[in-house]
Amino acid sequence: MSQFDTVIFDLDGTLLDTLEDLTDAVNYALGAYNMPLRTIEEIRCFVGNGVRNLMLQAVPQGEENPKFEEVFSLFKEYYGEHCNDKTGPYSGVVDLMAKLQEKGYVMGIVSNKIDSAVKELNSMYFADYIQVAIGEREGVQRKPAPDTVLAALQELGKKKETAIYVGDSEVDLATARNVGIPCISVLWGFRDKEFLEKCGADKFAIEPSDVLRFL
């Protein structure tokens, strides 16, 4: 067995391809208020740091816009009902989890997505493998603060010294750094290798099975 016994995953862009549903929800809310719509590539760049941050970038003038809170509220309502219209696991992800489980690894999910959505999507796709799924919730600092990852490790009864983090963005790299654990950056998600290298990434998974090499 390697030095690791615990794998903590990011969700959007790492396990699930959520980009189309997020784009649809953003544009539904923007369109309802006659604001310019966003392309899928713009949304790709905006995601990773929680839905409020996503909407701050998507809405013209962000929080300065007097309609911001209304648009944000409509986005959350629509996304809550449509978060699974086009979303699904990336190819190879479920196979990876099955192999990790077979080898005795314990797994969790930590995301900046709303906690209820994280739990719902986890129960829909990964319930057989993931024991703890944590999203953004009141009173707990979200990533890149270490709090949610430390909470997941505590719930799993595992130490950070034997944990590794798997994510697709600069937020995930910063989170792992703040927790004090290594990070594997996946290249099928929302950021490219060149960008991640600039953010300090040094372990890359081109496809899900590559994660096993680092363990």
Image (cartoon, grey):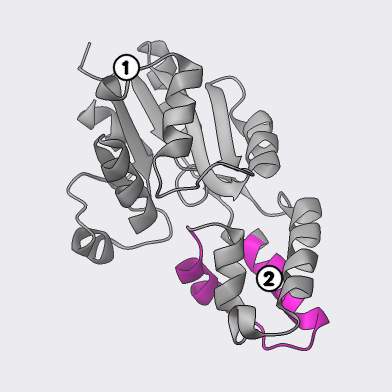
Rendered residue at 74%/72% (across/down):
69
Which residue is identified by label 2?
A: 26
Which residue is identified by label 1?
A: 5
Q: Tell me the magenta residue range.
A: 22-48
Q: Is residue 92 visible to us here? A: no
Q: Quadrant of the N terminus?
A: top left
| Position in image of residue 67 (x %, y %) | 76, 81
Q: Quadrant of the C terminus?
A: top left
| Position in image of residue 131 (x %, y %) | 55, 20
Rendered residue at 62%/70% (across/down):
55
Type of amino acid at the residue the image marks with label 1: Asp
Does residue 129 lie above or below 176 as drawn?
A: above
Type of amino acid at the residue the image marks with label 2: Val
| Position in image of residue 161 (x %, y %) | 25, 22
Instruction: Say if the magenta span includes residue 80.
Output: no
Foreground: 90 or 67?
Answer: 67
Task: Name the element at disc 2.
Answer: helix
Rendered residue at 53%/24% (across/down):
130
* Residue 178, quarter of picture: top left
Rendered residue at 20%/17% (across/down):
3
* Magenta portion: prevailing SS class: helix
